[in-house]
Image (cartoon, rainbow, N blue to C red):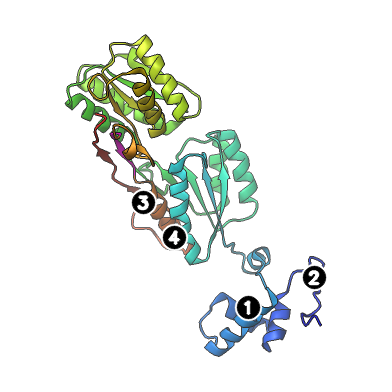
Amino acid sequence: MDTLPRRRRSSGRVTLQEVAREAGVSPITASRALRGERGVAAELVERVQAAAQRLGYVPDPAARALASARSSHVAVLVPLLSNALFVDVLEAVHRVLFPAGYQTLIGVTHYDPAEEELLLRSYLAHRPAGLLVTGFDRTEAARRLIGGSGVPCVHLMECAEVPGVHCVGFSQADAGAAITEHLLARGRRRVAFVAAQLDPRTLQRAEGYRRAMRRAGCYDPRLELLNPEPSSIALGARLLEELLKTRPEVDAVFFCNDDLAQGGLLAAARLGVEVPGRLAVAGFNDLAGSEQMLPPLTTVRTPRFEVGEAGARMLLALMRGERPAADAVQLDYRVVVRASS
């Protein structure tokens, strides 16, 4: 015989009232016990949790948000899920927010400010507890949406020293300059910059490259190869072949991302181009597989996990009504020198 109580909701969901009745307590006590509030006897908490488990009760976050005027969801907007960089950021965010009782709503903008604006309109209508966004490149309407929502917001991957703007990141331009300076220090003078996607952070790395090349008296705009297609290993191979055909004098290449650089290394091996003898190769982000390339890839190790973790902790403080120690947190990157340079 089915011993489960008849469900009163048309949705068929087990209700809090049913859990309370099963545990022999009031609905208010059941609610407080399931939320882990202090002041509820341990024996009652155990009884309510056991009843919830027996009945298969799942709390209704929408109802809880309406009752408390506070959501348990945080919206996180990233450009792509196919990029391991942002997967690492999301993993770090989850590790901080989930134990604190928050779930993440992930939105993918595809590097399109208009698409990000639509996502913001949709997510903010559901009154999230907080918001994590990538960078500062967005429409004016999106800025107004964030500013007028009253929802705490932290920007990731870039920093801006603007009072009241909360952000965690690192200097993309300085990191781009640092890897270029490494190639110059190895005696290379015809250093090319090869980039895809051409999102704001890629263009900041380009600025760092130009700064270093100008400082060394080596800058030549013809050594830049910029392609708006999405970054990939296949595209990196194709761009290296194009570079060697059109700029044969090049003696080093700084690829804006490791997947491009990995493709470049594979193309060099196929073409019989000696690396690093004939051509030094460097990437950016230190993605999985770069250390296993032949030769292992010189790159910039970016603090993406640390960005996600620090950004989530800053947002957690804001959602709790606390003031973060700093509005802007600038993290460190590191040039990782391997055999490709």
Residue that appears at 80% across and 74% down: 7
The mark lying in front, picked from 3 and 1, is 3
Mark 4 neighbour density, 10 Å: few (under 14) some (14–19) many (20 or more): some
Q: Secondary structure at mark 3?
A: helix
Q: Specify whether 266 is left or right of 40.
A: left
Q: Residue 306 got which mark? A: 3
Mark pair 3, 4: CA separation: 11 Å
What kind of residue is marked 3? Glu
- Magenta part of the chain: 297-302
Does the image show residue 154?
A: no
Q: Which residue, given by chain and number where applicable, does mark 2 sit on?
A: 9
Give residue 320's position: percent from left, percent from top: 47, 64
Residue that appears at 45% across and 40% down: 135
Above or below for 40 versus 119: below
Q: Which residue, given by chain and number where applicable, does mark 1 sit on?
A: 31
Q: Which residue, given by chain and number where applicable, does mark 4 sit on?
A: 96
Give residue 82's position: percent from left, percent from top: 51, 39
Q: Residue 200 got which mark? A: none
What kind of residue is marked 1? Ser
Residue that appears at 57% across and 45% down: 107
Residue that appears at 78% across and 80% down: 5
What kind of residue is marked 4? Val
Mark 1 neighbour density, 10 Å: few (under 14) some (14–19) many (20 or more): many
Mark pair 2, 4: CA separation: 34 Å
Mark pair 1, 4: CA separation: 24 Å
